Amino acid sequence: MSAAPDVIGVSIRDLIDIYSGVPVRVGDLPLSACFMPGQDTLSLAALQSLGLQPSAIQALARKSAIVQSNLHLVTDEQQMRACISRHFPAVGYLSKPIDTDKVLPCF
């Protein structure tokens, strides 16, 4: 990862926590997580690689206003990229790694 000031580093534990609804902070800012619906093939692959069930994350996002502010549901990869940029610092997943000023590969 580059040393650009708007690039964040997160651990696998941070990813598991944020997608599980546990608040994670990057410096003084809350980390957000963008995700696609649980039945999406990419969601299944990405989230199950962290040992998580996408359907549980979707339920968390609907259930609590506190969690909902840090978990953002999107419908496709274009919205995923926009979500990551809009809610910086944020994490998400894509079918192919991309490298822009707001999005870098994570895992």
Image: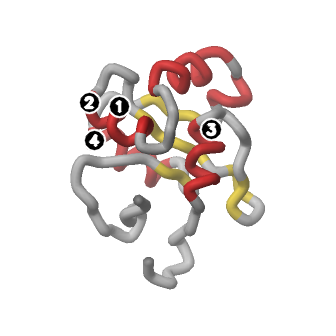
Amino acid carrying label 2: it is: Thr
Label 1 element class: helix
Amino acid carrying label 3: it is: Asn
**Labels 3 and 4 touching (C-beta < 8 A):** no
- When the figure is inspected, residue 58 is found, relative to residue 107, above or below; the finding is above
So how many labels did they put on this image?
4
- Distance (Cα) linking label 3 and label 4: 18 Å
**Labels 1 and 4 touching (C-beta < 8 A):** no
Q: Image quadrant of residue 103?
A: bottom left
**Labels 2 and 3 touching (C-beta < 8 A):** no
Residue found at x 54% / y 26%: 57
Quadrant where the N terminus sits is bottom left
Amino acid carrying label 1: it is: Leu
- When the figure is inspected, residue 5 is found, relative to residue 97, above or below; the finding is below
Residue found at x 65% / y 43%: 17
- Distance (Cα) linking label 2 and label 4: 12 Å
- Quickly name the residue at label 4: 77
**Labels 2 and 1 touching (C-beta < 8 A):** yes
Residue found at x 56% / y 68%: 9
Label 3 element class: loop
How many other residues sit within 10 Å of disc 3, few (<14), some (14-19) or many (≥20)?
A: many
Q: Which mark is residue 44?
A: 1
Q: Nearer the viewer, residue 10 or 68?
A: 10
- Quickly name the residue at label 3: 70
Label 2 element class: helix
- Distance (Cα) linking label 2 and label 1: 5 Å
- Quickly name the residue at label 2: 41
- Distance (Cα) linking label 1 and label 4: 14 Å
Label 4 element class: helix
Q: Earlier in the sequence, mark 2 or mark 3?
A: 2
Q: Which mark is residue 84?
A: none
- Distance (Cα) linking label 2 and label 3: 22 Å
